Image: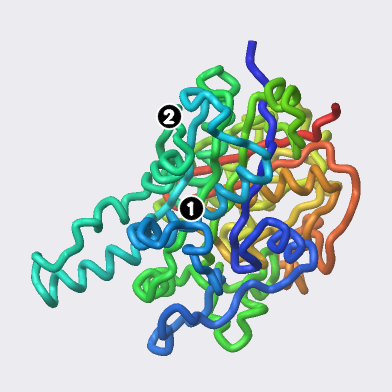
Amino acid sequence: MDRRVAVTGVGLITSLGLDTSTCWNGLLAGENGINRITSFDPSELEVQIAAEVRDFDPTQRIDFKKAKRMDRFCQFAIWSSGEAVTDAGITFDKENPERCGVLIGVGIGGIKIWEQELEKFFERGPNRVSPMLIPMMIPDMASGLVSIEYGICGPNFCTVSACASGAHAVGCSFEMIKQGKADLMITGGTEAALTACSVAAFANMRAISRRNTEPERASRPFDADRDGFVIGEGSGILILEELERARKRGARIYAEIVGFGLSGDAYHMTAPDPNGRGPKLAMRMALEEAAINPEDVDYVNAHGTSTELNDSMETMAIHGVFNTHAEKLWVSSTKSMTGHLLGGAGGLEAAVTALSIFTGKVHPTRNLEKPGEGCDLDYVPGSAREKKINVGISNSFGFGGHNVTLAFKRFEG
């Protein structure tokens, strides 16, 4: 028999704040997390805005020597995992380390350290390249370092599927617990890919917003004046546990995760299939595994990137899955405030969906002033709303045509 899986802990770090409470309250308030880039001089770049995590000092929670040997994406993962573990009330010295695992999705990894050491290689020679380059750069190191932090010996790897990486990690962790391969998983996504080179690359793809003079209005999912996404950074981590185990220890249960749908577009390297075939398949698969009818879904945390192609395609796909019930759904985009965390987005948005179900509150889609062509759903413009949410789903799509839908259900005692 398949086992049930609960969300018992959440840890967030985004441009809205360095802890879960600050991030969540900022989302509900519709706050802006996007400003002019400060971590490097962006004056020569065509795009000069991003959703940076500011005032972040990893040594507040990580030993200085250890922090120095971690790229920023790993520092975020350690930080938000600590938030989630504390939130869940887990003490790992009382756990069986072989029954606990870590699976954290990363889309790009240590691009900053890679750029720094490449510059050294060309300017100062091969002997000047840091021996720590490879372990600091590779995406799997977030999972590896978190497992070392807590002495966890169970399933441990990294999903890399562009902007679906974090969602794939959560889905795979769900399946591992469901199938009995682990009892507890630290999972989600993390990313810190904000460098001059990465901004230039995305800008040259014409994928990101050029609204440099008004960054607070730059990320505008589903709006007629959207002109691209905004690069963000940060991490979203969840603690998943086998439900009966969580109940026995008296854990607070945010929601049950009940479905995992995944698919491929088989269409284009970067553009989504305009017919939404892959996202429709992922949504239907998640609902089928959860044994949930489309009309029972209350909320969709959309991929909602603020790009012309994604937003209209995702809207079409939602219509295709939910038919007339689509008009009753609340749909909102976290990226309208946090920017796009790339590989970290799926973890953040899965956590936000669980929080929405637990609190009965749905954050708004910021900057939605006039819906764009083909964008005709209720995207919760203006301000947050409240109602009992029984079922919510979270969508994540990535370059390469990767699609994930995670389905969550309200836990009833």
Instruction: Give the camera-side residue of 338 and 71.
Output: 71
Residue depicted at x 72% and y 36% = 408
Residue depicted at x 61% and y 38% = 239
* Rendered image: mark on residue 43: none
Work out which residue is located at the far top of the displayed protein and give it.
Answer: 1
- Neighbour tally class for label 2: few under 14, some 14-19, many 20 plus, Cα within 10 Å: some
Q: Is residue 70 visible?
A: yes
Marks 1, 2: nearer the viewer:
2
Q: Secondary structure at mark 1?
A: helix
Which quarter shows the C terminus? top right
Q: What sort of colour scheme is used for the picture?
A: rainbow
Q: Is residue 406 above or below residue 76?
A: above
Give the residue at mark 2.
153
Give the residue at mark 1.
343
**What's under tag 2, amino acid-wise?**
Cys
Residue depicted at x 40% and y 62% = 64
Instruction: From the top left corner, tell me how far across and down residue 140 is, in percent.
Output: 37, 44
Instruction: From the top left corner, tell me how far across and down residue 162 is, in percent.
Output: 44, 51
Quadrant hosting residue 147: top left
Residue depicted at x 65% and y 68% = 16
Instruction: Give the camera-side residue of 116 and 339.
Output: 116
Instruction: Give the camera-side residue of 18 and 215.
Output: 18
